[in-house]
Image (cartoon, rainbow, N blue to C red):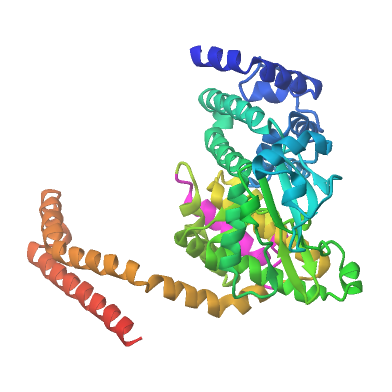
Amino acid sequence: MLKTIVVAARDRERLAEITAVATRFGLDLLLARMGLAKDRDGASPPDLPSRTRQALEALGPTYVKLGQILATRADLLPEDWISEFEKLHSAAPTLDFSTLRPLLEEALGEPVETAFARFDEAPLAAASMAQVHRAALHNGREVVVKIRRPGIRKSMEADLRLISHLAGIVEASNREARRFQPRALVQQLLDTVLEELDFTSEGRNADRLRADLAEQPRVVIPEIHWPLSSETVLVMDYVEGIAPRNAEALRAAGINPAAIADLGADLVLEMVLVNGRFHGDPHPGNLLCLPGDRLALLDLGLIGHVSARRQQEFLAFILSLRSNDAQTMADTLIGWHQGDRPSRERVLMASEQLIARHGSGPLVLGRMVADFFPLIRKEGLVLPPDLALIFKALITMDGVLGTIEPGFDLSQALQRSRARLIAHRLTASQSPEKLVPLLLELSRIADDAPRMLRALTRKLEAEGAAANGLTDGTLITAAKWLAAAILMSAAAVTAGLMLS
């Protein structure tokens, strides 16, 4: 209670704004169900998802980001809510450049006219977090200048304090809402907002992706001009191209939609399953098609990361779908679930249903996921946030590519990438920094196996193991063979690596 009073006192003006917006859009029932208002009877109005989306937009960038994160959680929310949250955008009224000039010149350390050969004061684009202007460097290179809006950090930090506190209340007081893991969602929001507020993070993301994709000459990542960039200003190359929204427009520009679709599919698989770093929101506004059937990635503020373990799990999921392996799919889904262990039999049945619908024929990811998420919601499965973002990025790219190339089939891209994916997994598993710990662990297990099995023998004897035909001699002999097998395996791995 004391913490609530302190938070409310510190941010009381913003809290009053939030309450007023919630009331204006008729969200009293939703707040009551979350445990943030007095209980109210009655059915949810059919347009509640739309009202909620409009309220989030009215509350500004922090709440828009929250809604965009929720749009990735089709494992938690039904389709009507997801489709509304996918409409969220961060557009905002443009600011007169005279308002931004002092901030820009403070970041540059010099007048705008000195830093740039030309600077267009009319904005190229405006969002709730930043405004973008076009300019030219003294060497003739065309650039865009992204300038953070004045005061935006302070207001977003206030929102984050309030949202974090409210998430704690919801998780503690509402059993139904607890399944949504409010505090985990807020932590994801916190990480996302703090990273996007610091424009140097976006710049580093661009540099890393460019390095990851250095062997992909048809993929373009704008170069960052670091001497002119800072936490509040980002200067990068201007890229001119066509958004992948219309196949005819691409053809008119001499760009082959089918080639772009193939490149986009190969690219997203490379980022997720090989590099472990991917564009978190590859919608048409963040992609440009260029002459030579090239593809540019823009707006790199949101980057997802995939661990080697998650790469292996996700690949196992996709391959189990295409090879009609319901057992492996069920094991993967249960391993992903965050919560009480579900019924394996029910998850297996859900896996069999999914395979029956999508195990053969073209793999259209959007259609598959449209069936996948309702099935796992029905079984009460909750995906980890990083995995939800992977699905979201793949679905978004799949939708874009399907728009410009109807009938696009992701399984063809998987087939093309299979050799590279296998080579990557083998190379990763054979790296010296992983091999040495593996061999040491194998050696330790070999040394400990007899001791562990002797201890197991004593326990089994105490519980009547003899009745099952297990004797100390039998187990010790097994332990020796186990230790020998482990050491022989380790030797074989080492020899194979040395010969290769």
In reply to whether residue 353 is colored magenta, the answer given is: yes
Q: Is residue 201 left or right of residue 119?
A: left
Q: Quadrant of residue 358?
A: bottom right
In reply to whether residue 412 is colored magenta, the answer given is: no
Q: Position of residue 453 (x, y in %)?
A: 15, 60
Q: Is residue 369 left or right of residue 403?
A: left
Above or below residue 444? Residue 388 is: above
Q: Position of residue 329 (x, y in %)?
A: 52, 61
Q: Position of residue 179 (x, y in %)?
A: 55, 36
Q: Is residue 438 left or right of residue 201?
A: left
Residue drawn at the location 80% of the way across and 41% of the way down? 91
Above or below residue 71? Residue 26 is: above
Closest to the observer, 437 or 30: 437
Q: Position of residue 183 (x, y in %)?
A: 53, 33
Give the dominant element type of the magenta stretch: helix, strand or loop. helix
Q: Residue furthest left?
A: 473
**Residue 390 visible, this orientation:** no
Q: Quadrant of residue 238?
A: bottom right
Residue drawn at the location 46% of the way across and 62% of the way down? 308
Q: Residue furthest bottom?
A: 499
Residue drawn at the location 89% of the way across and 72% of the way down? 253
Q: Quadrant of residue 43?
A: top right
Closest to the observer, 71 or 360: 71
Image quarter of the C terminus? bottom left
Bounds of the magenta segment = 341-366
